[in-house]
Image (cartoon, rainbow, N blue to C red):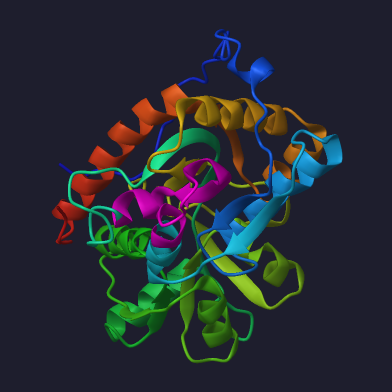
Amino acid sequence: MRKSLFIVLMSVLVVTGLFASGTKENAVYPSGAVELVALGSAGGGSDVLARNITDVINIHNLVPEPVNVVNKAGGGGAVGIAYTNQKQDKDYALMTINSTHCLLIHTTDIIPKGREPWTPIACVATDAQTLVTRTESPFQSWEDVAKAIKENPASMTIGCCDDMDAMTLAILERETGTQFNHTAYFASSEIFSALLGGHIDFAIANPSEVVGLVEGGRVRVLGTFTPERLSGIFAEVPTFTELGYPACQVEQLRGIVGPEGMSRDVQLYWSDILEQVCQTEEWNKNYIDSNFLTPTFLAADDFAVYLDDHEANLVEFAKSNGMEVF
């Protein structure tokens, strides 16, 4: 059976009595700086998420100690996951994750098999995927691409930097009957350097990663992997569903976790802080709306349940597309 990777999140449940035991009121946490590890380079989707969270925390003085963003790119997130889990004090590190990382832990040996490398804290949004080319490209639409590539398969190069990009591309190729020449990159910043330099023809990217380039007239978006059109600067971009490929739907979660071994009290503390972040005007204006995201909040325990199901679906899909998983 063909499956879309479109992720339908459960209804948001408001967790009441999160600190019913008095944990939050009685805690003296944090008593020092906390690191928020962004699993990617500066300017990428994980970095944008991390810095918007710290901006809101600072504006509203939600935490009594500094929360410092640390970028750890590499291995599709493997470098940052390993870095975070090596921390001696598990209660003073946080980490961004997305759907790519949920699959990564099943396709690499960065952690012992059968163990989760993190403590779920909160899901804060869902993100989309797009297909882009540089503005100097002769391809004005997906129809131009499909015609050219079918006449000469694998003649055009597309850049991907993680498993989610690769899976998005696998869906696109399968559903449209096309075949690209794939090139893997270390980080999204490398992909855009290659794209703008004319070294590759296309890229798979999140809206937040390309909005500045679109506004600057440097890239053209040919299609979105969403059930409905995005808003704002992407409003005129057709979805692949509109183009006749309803199974070309891919959305991924954006969330925050702690290292494996984070204490329960601290897990719930940060879940509460992130719920407050997601309720602010600044968050919804500067992060959700500006990056064309869907606002989605799941508190720690609901997020844990969702992650189990989400990972299972990703692994099943990966297997069906020939990826080696465990």
Tell me where residue 238 appears, x and y as whole percent: 54, 54
Write down the region rendered in magenta: 82-104
Does the stretch in magenta take in 90? Answer: yes
**Quadrant in the rendering for residue 86:** bottom left
**Quadrant in the rendering for residue 4:** top left
Q: Nearer the viewer, residue 54 or 83?
A: 83
Say if residue 46 shows up in the picture: yes
Q: Is residue 131 left or right of residue 286?
A: left
Q: Is residue 167 left or right of residue 209?
A: left
Above or below residue 129? Residue 252 is above
- Residue appearing at x 60%, y 51% in the figure: 36
**Quadrant in the rendering for residue 234:** bottom right
Does the stretch in magenta take in 81? Answer: no
Q: Is residue 194 left or right of residue 157?
A: right
Say if residue 298 shows up in the picture: no
Tell me where residue 286 appears, x and y as whole percent: 77, 46
Above or below residue 129? Residue 312 is above
- Residue appearing at x 65%, y 57% in the figure: 69
Q: Nearer the viewer, residue 122 or 112?
A: 112
Tell me where residue 35 appears, x and y as whole percent: 61, 52
Q: Nearer the viewer, residue 150 or 311?
A: 311
